Image (spheres, grey):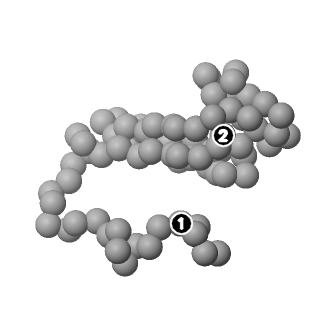
Amino acid sequence: MPGSGINTSIYAPDESIKRSDDNLSFLFIARLIKDKGIEEYIEAIKQLKPLHPKVSFKILGSLYPGNPTSIQEKELNS
């Protein structure tokens, strides 16, 4: 679909930069509805965090209480 995703040919990681868990961070940017993959992101955090405790995971998005697939504030806080 045009306009969806990132062109990885243009925005590819710079392989010359040495990386470590000390500065690795993931950011989920989307409306906080199940259709956008927030549940999969949370599941990935649960699996990766024990293996890589220094990696950070962040969420940037708004709650949509009127949407039937919206994440509830209680869920987000837990």
**Front-most of residues 52 and 29:** 29
Sequence order check, earlier mark of 2 and 1: 1
14 with respect to 44 (left or right): left
Pointer 2: what residue? 32
* Residue that appears at 53% across and 46% down: 29
* View extreme (front): residue: 3
**Quarter containing the C terminus:** top right
Pointer 1: what residue? 5
Whether residue 46 is visible to the viewer of this picture, yes or no, is no
Spot occupied by residue 22 in the image (x, y as percentages of width and height): 23, 40
Seen in the picture, residue 65 relative to 34 is either above or below; the reply is above
Query: In the structure shown, which secondary structural element does the residue marked by tag 2 occupy?
Result: loop
**Front-most of residues 50 and 13:** 13
Q: Quadrant of residue 11?
A: bottom left
Spot occupied by residue 76 in the image (x, y as percentages of width and height): 63, 28
38 with respect to 64 (left or right): left
* Residue that appears at 37% across and 37% down: 56
**Front-most of residues 65 and 75:** 65
Residue type (three-letter) at the residue carrying disc 2:
Leu
58 with respect to 16 (left or right): right
Query: In the structure shown, which secondary structural element does the residue marked by tag 1 occupy?
Result: loop
Q: Quadrant of residue 69?
A: top right
Q: Which mark is on residue 18?
A: none
Whether residue 15 is visible to the viewer of this picture, yes or no, is yes
Which class describes the residues within 10 Å of circle 1: few (<14), some (14-19), or many (20+)? Answer: few
